[in-house]
Image (spheres, rainbow, N blue to C red):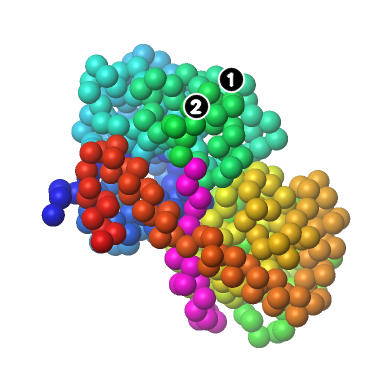
Amino acid sequence: MSQPLHILHVQGSFDLGGKEARTARLMNIWGHRARHSLLLGNPHMTGACAAIEPDIDARVVTDGPSIGGSPSYAGLSALARYMKGFDLILSYNWGAMNAVMAHRLFGRALRLPALIHHEDGFNADEAARLSWKRNLYRRIALGGGGAQALVVPSTQLERIAICAWGQGCGKVHHIPNGIDVAAYAARPFPDAIPGLEKTDGRIVVGTLAGLRPVKNLTRLVRIAAPVKDRITLVIVGTGPERERIYAEAQALGLDSIVLPGFLPRPQDFIGLFDIFALTSDSEQFPISLVEAMAAGLPVISTDVGDVSAMLAGANRPFLFSPNDEAGMARGLATLVEDALLRARLGANNQQRAREAFDEERMVARYAALYGAAARSNALSESLT
């Protein structure tokens, strides 16, 4: 048996989100084949650690160098020296770009392990338009020896990586997110979502998201308000927008709303939803959407990222421009009123998830990419 790889994960935070769900799932699948250190820009945002199985060797670094702020020689060199003690470096999104720059500047001299960077999407400050300054910094940091490979989950991000960040086609790896589709088909326990009572005949409209501005969950409250007497709105996740969401609901008289916080196993509860809603200003390839499809749910969503290509064709009329809240409200009302339509769209989405988004291929591709970079077959061995 090969020695376990010691992997350093560098990212701004580790709260609930698509990349965190995928990272935790890969950790769980690889088990004792790897051990993990998480170097975070905000070491207090660690809600997704609950999704890591207890026997996995994973820890949040509390004594490491800072990864945020304006780059400086001292800061970047400290980051580079810290990276020496690992077998593989995995960096994620803009919050880790200083680590990528440190690797480019000092990697060869210090003989640092390979670094693979991942880009999964953008926060509210780049939802509408990418920052030219960040594009330039990414282009410089990712070039040369900054990153051995760049992984993206969506076709839109693949185009951005090649055209805006100047990365060669051979360096960019498009690996769509996948899940254990079969696990989402089981009937959930009725009490799997704290605070949700499915005894009054209300339709449950639900979502899974970090409560952040880019997810625009106040938009979800607004499109749900016209059918507030027919539904219960459930928003699973944590984040700084919680009070704002509650305030919007109170202002619009939407009293039946449940915010249970972070729940670690979506397959245990997402089937309690009747409709899945996604109202983000920006997405790329949202895992929560695949989870909803695997659970057999109809979807109403903003038309962002790869969402249109992900959904079954029959569900695509329920995609709307982020600016078309009136259209979204009408679409949601249609789904609330028509149980047969919900069932048909849900079945189509579930079939689409089975055919296209099971995790087996995703896991194999990550194992091959990471293993080649670390010059180890430990992760691939876990698949046999």
What predominant SS class does the magenta segment belong to?
loop
Residue at coordinates 51% horizontally, 60% vertically from top-left? 357
Residue 46 in the image, given as x and y percentages of width and height: 42, 49
On the picture, is 109 further left or further right than 200? Answer: left
Q: Earlier in the sequence, mark 1 or mark 2?
A: 1
Report, in whole angstroms, how far the alpha carbon at label 1 lies from the one at label 2.
16 Å
**Which marked residue is nearer to the observer: mark 1 or mark 2?**
2
The residue that mark 1 highlights is: 133
On the picture, is 365 further left or further right than 218? Answer: left
Residue at coordinates 19% horizontally, 49% vertically from top-left? 4
On the picture, is 82 further left or further right than 271? Answer: left
Residue found at the far front of this picture: 170
The residue under label 1 is which amino acid type?
Answer: Lys
The residue nearer to you, when weighing 362 against 339, is 362
On the picture, is 336 further left or further right than 274? Answer: right
Q: Is residue 294 in sight in this rendering? A: yes
Q: Does the segment drawn in magenta span residue 178? A: yes
* Badge 1 density bin: few <14, some 14–19, many ≥20, Cα 10 Å: few
The residue nearer to you, when weighing 19 against 11, is 19
Query: Where the C terminus falls, by quadrant?
Result: bottom left
Residue at coordinates 62% horizontally, 80% vertically from top-left? 197
Q: Is residue 259 in sight in this rendering? A: no
Residue 364 in the image, given as x and y percentages of width and height: 36, 53
Span colored in magenta: 174-194
Picture quadrant of residue 330: bottom right
The residue that mark 2 highlights is: 167
Above or below — where is 117 with respect to 237?
Answer: above
